[in-house]
Image (cartoon, helix red, strand yellow):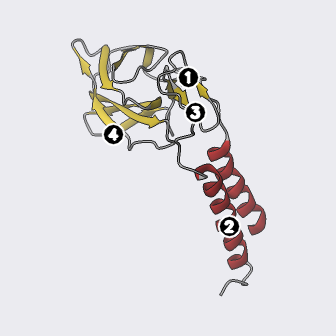
Amino acid sequence: MHKLLALVLAALLASNVIASDGGINEEANLDGTDIESMEYNSIVYANQEFTISLTLKNEITNLSHINWITQVCINSGVCYPPKTIQMNTLDNETWTAAVIVDQEATYLNWRIDQVDNNDSVTRVPETGFGWKIWSDCWYDGEEWGGNDTSCMTEDDESLPGFILSVALSSIIIAALIVQRSEGKYE
């Protein structure tokens, strides 16, 4: 059982690093949430402001504020730490926020956190980031894409062997876990 668990863990880690859906935007399902709609551009532009606007289904009486949690990932394969941006509203129904996107942006991830007066958080989606919007010039670790070619280079400027080394490390860690669980690791 431990061997199977370790192998599944290694496969999941490797697939997350190796798998690529370059250029395909993702958006969370809003069904079952307090959010009626969300408006944003379908492309992220380098060094430009990216804005979102969301409308709630009904006014929530105990809503303190809404946070927009963003994460910018860049063409070298690195993702910056998430950034929390408190959204603005004039009527407690429509909320807006903006972020300046990095020059080397591959894509922008985000989620929404609704915070009530008791500091309880309702997260959309419940786990991870629900939205991923690709830039106009991106590199997904395997290929270049987007309408703008200014960021594209002949040489792969991403971290050399990064994807392979992370996948290999995952497999080695899984093997060590299996050995340890069988009592062979000393």
Q: Name the residue that disc number 4 marks.
A: 120
Mark carried by residue 19: none
- Disc 1 versus disc 2: nearer the observer: 2
Q: Name the residue that disc number 3 marks.
A: 154
| Residue type for callout 1 | Asn
| Picture coordinates of residue 17, whole percent (x, y) | 62, 46
For mark 4, give the secondary structure. Answer: loop
CA–CA distance in space, label 4 to label 3:
49 Å
Residue density around tag 2, few if under 14, some if 14–19, many if 20 or more, within 10 Å: few
Q: Is residue 23 visible?
A: yes
Taking 58 as reference, is 26 left or right?
right
Q: Name the residue that disc number 1 marks.
A: 29
| The quadrant where residue 27 appears | top right
Instruction: Identify the residue shown where x is 34% and y is 24%.
Output: 47
Whichever of callouts 4 and 2 sits on the residue coming sooner in the sequence is: 4
For mark 3, give the secondary structure. Answer: loop
| Residue type for callout 3 | Glu
